[in-house]
Amino acid sequence: MYSQGLIGAKEDVVEDDAFLEAFQRRIDAEEKIEPNDPMPKAYRNTLIRMIGQHAHSEIVGMLPEGNWITRAPSLRRKVALLAKVQDEGGHGLYLYSAAETLGVSREQMTEELLDGTAKYSSIFNYPTPTWADIGTIGWLVDGAAIMNQVPLCRCSYGPYARAMIRVCKEESFHQRQGYELVQSLCTGTSEQKAMAQDSLNRWWWPSLMMFGPSDTESQHSDQSMKWKIKRFTNDELRQKFVDATVPQAEHLGLSIPDENLVWNSEKNNTQGGYDFGEINWKEFWQVVKGHGMMNRDRIAARKKAWDDGAWVREAAAAFADKQRKTADAA
Ligand code: BYC
């Protein structure tokens, strides 16, 4: 899908065995790959796909929470939520810029999001009917994002790895504000605590789905691990998330909605970990393929924002054109 229109890409290199082995040696030596370095076409396309999907997730991720900005219950909560949603917009911009260093344009990536060819995280296709969802998203969704994204700070592609450092710091603040919000609900009235439990019941399984298909089904993990784009498999990260989050739920006095959740001291090389129930993979693939509860609304909202912003793009292009002509005439 991304093989056409690589605006900044270097001429294709001859991908013979010597080239591929030399490239792998650089990866194995933990050297960072930079935009002008020769790289296999598949490495470039894997990164464009993954960084593009990540950027789209940040941008679409602003929608479910943005929905609550006008209804935040206090000024303090409103300020925190506004800042969080703005941070997600900033993450999207870093990531589009990182993808552009690989030779794909932001316009092309946006078109692929709007026409449904590019993916974004399944998690943002679930609705946010209650205020507790704002806390739960910070706690679980940003918590899962951190688990997945901290290892990406060591990704072999330099611009992505560097962008992830600031993103992770901000996600960490988001996770804390979410946990603190849920904690307030859990120490409030019985109705507030019930609202927090209901929200956890709805977001727990979709949060586990964020890590992607199981290792036996993941198409890209093996190669991405060899290229040190990914440092852990989907299942390894999912397990770390479950092990970190269950004690947090216990501290809040909330129940994880999984009757098969049980401590297993033999897990994780006998360090112990939780066994947990089977994810509903049918639901996961339905959402990924565009048939979740909110897929249509999310894309319609993005399309409207893109169309409404057309005059800004035209004005910016006209201004740049005028500057160029002035410079040429001087
Ligand atoms: N939703 O072979 P696999 C965030 C797709 S956090 C939708 O395992 P890979 C945020 C996958 O793309 C969320 N699609 O792929 C948080 C592939 O399809 P294609 C974003 C999914 O790439 C808080 C196919 O399934 N984070 O933004 O090795 C607030 C097979 O999967 C999902 C990132 O993007 C899913 N959950 O691993 C605001 C982090 N899972 O491309 C914002 C970077 C899988 O072949 N990305 N698919 O058509 C990654 O770490 C990896 O790309 C994934 C998937 C773990 C997501």
Image (cartoon, rainbow, N blue to C red):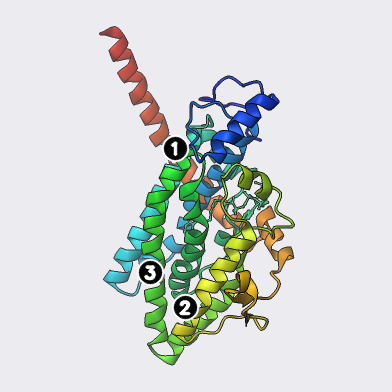
Q: Amino acid at mark 1?
A: Ser
Question: Where's residue 93, x and y in %?
Answer: 42, 43
* Farthest-out residue, top: 329
Q: What number is the disc on residue 158?
A: none
Q: Tell us which disc is closer to us: 2 or 3.
A: 2
> How far is mark 2 from mark 1, CA to CA?
35 Å
Residue indicated by mark 3: 176
Residue occupying the point 51% across, 74% down: 245
Residue indicated by mark 2: 248
Q: Amino acid at mark 3?
A: Arg
* Number of numbered callouts drawn: 3
> How far is mark 3 from mark 1, CA to CA?
27 Å
Q: Quadrant of the C terminus?
A: top left
Residue occupying the point 69% across, 69% down: 279
Residue indicated by mark 1: 97
- Say few, some or many: other residues with alpha carbon within 10 Å of mark 3 (under 14 / 14 to 19 / 20 or more): some
What secondary structure is found at the residue carrying circle 3? helix
Nearest to N terminus: mark 2 or mark 1: 1
Nearest to N terminus: mark 3 or mark 1: 1
Residue 93 visible in rendering: no
Q: In the rendered view, does 132 fall on the left or right side of 211? A: left
- Say few, some or many: other residues with alpha carbon within 10 Å of mark 1 (under 14 / 14 to 19 / 20 or more): many
Q: Tell us which disc is closer to us: 2 or 1.
A: 2
* Farthest-out residue, bottom: 190
Q: Quadrant of residue 293?
A: bottom right
Q: Quadrant of the N terminus?
A: top right
